[in-house]
Every structure is written in C-alpha cells, then in structure tokens.
Image (tube, rainbow, N blue to C red):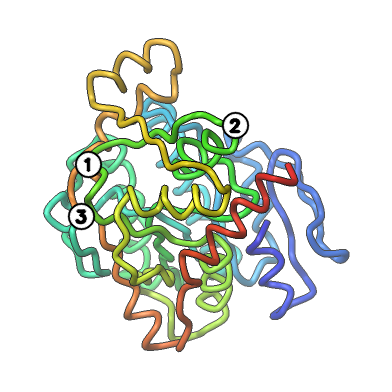
Amino acid sequence: MPLARELRQYTGQIRLVSRNPEKVNPTDELFPADFTDFTQIQKAIAGSEVVYVVVGFEYNIKVWRQLWPPFMKAVLDACITHHAKLVFFDNVYMYAESAIPHMTEEAPLQPPSKKGAVRKQLHEMIFDEVEKNSLPALIARSADFYGPDNRNSTLSIMAAENLAKGKKAQAMGKLDKVHTYTYTPDAARATAILGNTADAYNQVWHVPTTGEKLTSRQWIQLIADELNVEPEIQRIPLWMLRAMGLFVPVLREFPEMLYQYENDYIFDSSKFENRFGMKAVAPVDGIKAMVRSLKVS
C-alpha cells in the first residue's frame, strides 16, 4: 500500500486494517477485519490518532447503497468515541456534470449518477459532523488514477494491459477530449501530508494531478510508445458497453459514468500545490512506471 510507505515518514505506529492485511513496513500492526461487520470498526479504530479510510467496496450500486452509508456512520462514530481524526480518500463522482471540464474543491455537489449520489451522501455525513465540531476530518479527493501495481485503473485495464498483450487498447467516450489522471504514488504522498498537517483539516483537498492537458488518445500513445507498439484503439460506444455488461458484470456499472469521458475532464489541484509546493509526476514518467510494473507482473 503506497500510503503505508509514505506514513512511515511520520510514525512508526501504523495499523493496517483489511480482510487480509499484509505488512508494508516491518513495524506495521496487522488487524484483520470484515468491513461488512460494522461492529469490528470500533475495535479497529481504538487507540488511533488519525484514521485513513482508503477502502473500496465492490463496484456495484446495490453494494454501495447497502454498505457505504452504514460503514461511514460506524467510522465516524468510532472516530468520535476514540477522539481520532479522519482522512477520507474520495473520488469526483459527486460533482455536477457541468463541473467536469474544470473541477475544483468548490465544484457543486450535484451528481448525475446513482453512484455519485452515494458519494455525495458520504461527503455530507462527514461534514455534518465537522460542522457540529464532533471531530476533525478532511477529504483527499483524486481524479481517475493510474500508476504502478494498480489493477483497478481503467487506463491500465483497458489500455496498458491490452496493448501489452498485443491487443487493441479500448477506450470509452470521445478520444480527443482532455482527461487528466492522478498518479497513485502522488496521491499516497499527498494524503499522508494532509493527515499530518493540523490546518489541513475540515476541508476538501484535490491531491496533485497533472496539469498537462492530454487527451485519451494521447495517454494511449504514451503507453504504446513505452511498450514500443502501435497505438491501435478500439473505441467502445455506449451500446457496446451495455452489450459487454451482459457478460462482464462490472461493465454494467460503467454506462452511467460515461459522461466523464464525453467531455473534457480537468482536475485542478492548484490549492494543494500552492499550499504544499508539491507537483504531480509528469505523465511520461508515470506511464513508464506503470508499464514497468506490468512487465514484471
């Protein structure tokens, strides 16, 4: 976990909580827990000074509606009980569609998707408690992401892995629209910085994300160049995505998010950059690391 590696700079007392945790640092404390059993969360958080929530549930709207709100309530209750600060790592689904061409921390929360509505609910749950002075909390928000040793990124799944196998890269939406991506090691470093900065709490922060306005086609070209292959692309329109979803359950969840690939998608992280002086890794260097991790897998 990149975040655990970054946190080692701040403390030697790191507790990793998941179903099957594995040590990242030699002194890590491992705490196996089932996040669908909310009674375990109190024990997992007890004794913590800062709680970093970077969990992801199955990418399914039914699962999200069932698990996310009660999970977040259990986390908030436990943080309040044990006087812990909360750092929640989030995405951009709750932003209004009109904000996607240039997203800032002040973007309106008016999601056009069902999954976005769940994320908006979580945002509101956190800041309801902040406004009541129940606990210090912050949200570290990321754009779509990419990076080494990461198999959940659409850029990796649909483009890098396919090109590495001699197949065409697949892409959704309009190929010549700008789409900024967050490099996962940058996100981890920034999240650790925020959690250990007293005046960063009680607000939203966009983690450092490239300011290079690359289109989806240009991202795929970078990957193809690094793999030394032709950047052949299969564009997946909405009807094809729905058809593929009949056979691949996770793809059924993508159509409502397609709007993010039909418009320019620019994630502005200047607030963080100006405050902390940290810039995102250049896309060409981030793609090199991502492709290198594929080659050794």
Q: Secondary structure at mark 3?
A: loop
Nearest the viewer among 266 and 282 is: 282
Residue indicated by mark 2: 165
> Which residue is rendered at x = 53% and y = 69% of the image?
186
> Which residue is rendered at x = 35% and y = 22% of the image?
252
Residue 150 spot, x, y in % from top left: 59, 47
Label 3 Cα crowd, 10 Å radius (few <14 / some 14-19 / many 20+)? many
Left or right of 191 in this view: 128: left
Residue 277 spot, x, y in % from top left: 45, 88
> Which residue is rendered at x = 73% and y = 42% of the image?
297
Q: Amino acid at mark 1?
A: Lys
Q: Is residue 174 visible?
A: yes
Residue indicated by mark 3: 264
Residue 203 spot, x, y in % from top left: 35, 73
Label 1 Cα crowd, 10 Å radius (few <14 / some 14-19 / many 20+)? many
Q: Secondary structure at mark 2?
A: loop
Label 2 Cα crowd, 10 Å radius (few <14 / some 14-19 / many 20+)? few
Residue lying farthest to the top in this orientation: 246
Q: Where's the N terminus, which quadrant?
A: bottom right
Q: Amino acid at mark 3?
A: Asp
Numbered disc in front, either 2 or 3: 2
Compared with 69, 45 (above or below) is below
Residue lying farthest to the right in this orientation: 26
- Whether tag 2 and tag 3 are in contact, CB under 8 A, the answer is no
Q: Amino acid at mark 2?
A: Lys
